[in-house]
Amino acid sequence: MLTKSPLFSLCAAIVLSLPTVSAFAQTSHSRPNVEPNRESGQSTDNALEYVTSWIGNTYGGENPNPPNNSLLHVPLDMDSIYVTPDGRVFSNTVWDEGGRAVSVFKNGQLISPLNSQNNSPNWSNGGGVAIAAAGSQVFVSYSPNGTGVGILNANDLSNTGLSLSGSSTLPNSHGIFGMTVARGKLYVTENDVNLVEVFDISTLTLVNTFSVNNPVRIAVDQAGGMWISHRDQTPLLSLDGNVYDINGQMGLDSVDHYDSAGTYLNTITVPDSAEVSALTVNADGLLLVADDGSDEDIKIYANLEANPILIGTFGEKGGDYAGPVSGRVGPGRFRGITGIGTDAKGNLYVSQSGFGLDMGVGHGLTLQSYSLYGALNWERQGLEFQTMASIDPHSETDVYDANHHFILDYSKPPGKEASSLS
């Protein structure tokens, strides 16, 4: 858990979610607390009573108060998040089966629309890895399946028709894995061409280009210093020989520090064979480093301008694979961190996919918010891709799919019966 940092002390809990629509049959020992369905004209004597519900997702797919055919679900993944000072959480993912590649959350509520009525971009545009936001604009990477950066309207995610200008490489880059906004500038990493480019937010024009080898995630401190992580580019073995798969690489254990002019200053080597998967600098000037290695926690660094020092960690060491029950989800037991961010009040937001920077699909998404003191504010889940689930006929309350174990409580309303155990 948290060690030696006055900023954090962690407790969390993971509950319900998954989108496969199921019908929970009644049993002699559990009656749903809702009116059962009956066929028209059917007598109450021989009626088959049932309740339609779902597990695997916080939301059931449709907004109960739709503005225009609004669809409501938590995406199956988030490859990164960006948090604004007012607590909005912007997320991006390479693929969401339900068409919600870009989403916006605030106070635990999904506030971004998704429908076919108002130019929702998810219907026509693919997603990507990186995202950032400033004012009324959202900057969305379309890498690695697409190229470049799109600019959306922060209020409804409609296309603005605007674009970043001045770069000869950005429009064709497949390697935009990190973006952040600081000091009126947008910082973009272009991994495939070994560049970090900086754009003025007000004019959307290029103002600086820095040569950085293998840049991935990026954070900017209060002095304008850039903190940049990297990927392990060791070639992967295949039956045909050595190949390099940009979607199958882990983060390295190093974070390089550059000043605002792009001059290299020093390197943080994150301990315990770390795999850095996300970075952010909070309002107090602390650097938070998500470690998707064996520790599966968040390292906290202070004294950034002089000699960075590790002052604490956030999360249980080992994540959800820590003892005494390996695989058990619970307080601070992170699993494949993909994004971290903080707001002006010090709340911390953590997205997790089970894969981390490796960008796999199938383990499902958990997005959590923690207070300044480590208490869980809220949690949202989109835990399924395409899968099947089965109820244990002996207990009638245990549900299993390929990656998860859920417990059902039939006394709860539809969509709330399932809690995630592991």
Image (spheres, rainbow, N blue to C red):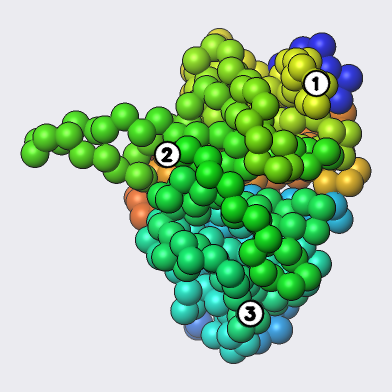
Q: Which percent across, then down, holds residue 286? A: 80, 30
Q: Residues within 10 Å of mark 2 (few under 14, many from 20)?
A: many
115 is higher (above) or lower (below) than 185: below
Q: Which percent across, then down, holds residue 199? A: 67, 61
38 is higher (above) or lower (below) than 375: below
Q: Residues within 10 Å of mark 3 (few under 14, many from 20)?
A: few
Q: Which residue is mark 3?
A: 162
Asked which secondary structure carries label 1, the reply is loop
* Closer mark to the observer between disc 3 and disc 1: 1
Mark seen at residue 358 = 2
Mark seen at residue 369 = none
Mark sitting earlier along the chain (3/1): 3
Q: Is residue 177 left or right of residue 413?
A: left
Q: Which residue is mark 1?
A: 306
Q: CA distance from mark 3 to mark 1?
A: 39 Å
- Residue at 29% x, 43% y: name it: 245
Mark sitting earlier along the chain (1/2): 1
Q: Nearer the viewer, residue 69 or 5?
A: 5
* Closer mark to the observer between disc 2 and disc 3: 3
Question: Disc 3 residue type?
Answer: Leu
Question: Disc 2 residue type?
Answer: Asp
Question: Disc 1 residue type?
Answer: Ala
Q: Nearer the viewer, residue 115 or 338?
A: 338
Residue 15 quadrant: top right
The reply to whether discs 1 and 2 touch (Cβ–Cβ < 8 Å) is: no
284 is higher (above) or lower (below) than 273: below
Asked which secondary structure carries label 3, the reply is loop
